[in-house]
Amino acid sequence: MQVLQVQLEVGPDPAEVGRARRWARSRLVGSGIEDDEPVAETLILLISELVTNAVVHTGCPAVLRMLFGLGAADAGTVRVEVADLSSCPPTPRHAEGEDTNGRGLELVDGLADRWGWQPEGGGKQIWCEVDRVSGCTAAAGEGATAAAPAPVVATAAAVACECEPSRPVTTARLA
């Protein structure tokens, strides 16, 4: 099976998130995923959240990667990876009430079929996967299985911390 990988360098400016979304939309269409497919909207939201987290919480450039053609030929799994220069693990938070922050990783956990993070170079890579077959149901909160342990939760801020290298972590939503 052939896998197509495309990537975009994203600057440390929150305005770059919009550029990343536009770029990702064009790559989705180029891979055969139409703009109006529910899986496309799910992927764009996931990309927006992961790129926003990388840019806002590290203040450094990041790299957005999309990999097409993973999994079984009929499944068509799309993997999204965002690598940044911070070695700190992602810190899931729980937003309450009218909080304007703290929902990003909750959204990723709710929409992706699988997600996790691992060290990459001097920083880290956060990734998620959406199966085209279940992409529509994943957006509705169905179709994921518990296939891996819960994420590692850290309490350090991602901007200025020095973290110990960590093992790769895989997570999946519990159905």
Image: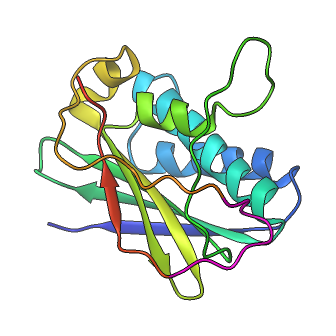
Q: Which residues are magenta?
A: 156-164
Where residue 144 sits: x, y (%)? Answer: 23, 30
* Residue sitting at x 77%, y 49%: 17
Q: Is residue 47 among the parts visible in the rendering? A: yes
Q: Name which quarter of the figure residue 64 lies in.
A: bottom right
Task: Measuring from the top left, give residue 120's x and y in whole percent.
Answer: 49, 81
Q: Is residue 34 visible?
A: no
Query: Residue 148, how many percent across, how many down?
Result: 21, 49
User: What residue appears at the point 10 percent right and 51 percent down from the top-left corner?
Assistant: 72
At which x and y percent is residue 88? 61, 69
Q: Is residue 124 left or right of residue 70?
A: right
Please name the residue shown 56% across and 69% down the image: 7
Question: Image height check: is 107 above or below 149?
Answer: above
Magenta region's main secondary structure?
loop
Eyeballing the image, is 125 above or below 76?
below
Q: Residue at x 47, y 77 (%)?
A: 119
| Quarter that holds the C terminus | top left
93 and 60: which is toward the camera: 93
Quadrant in which residue 170 is drawn: bottom left
The stretch drawn in magenta includes residue 37: no
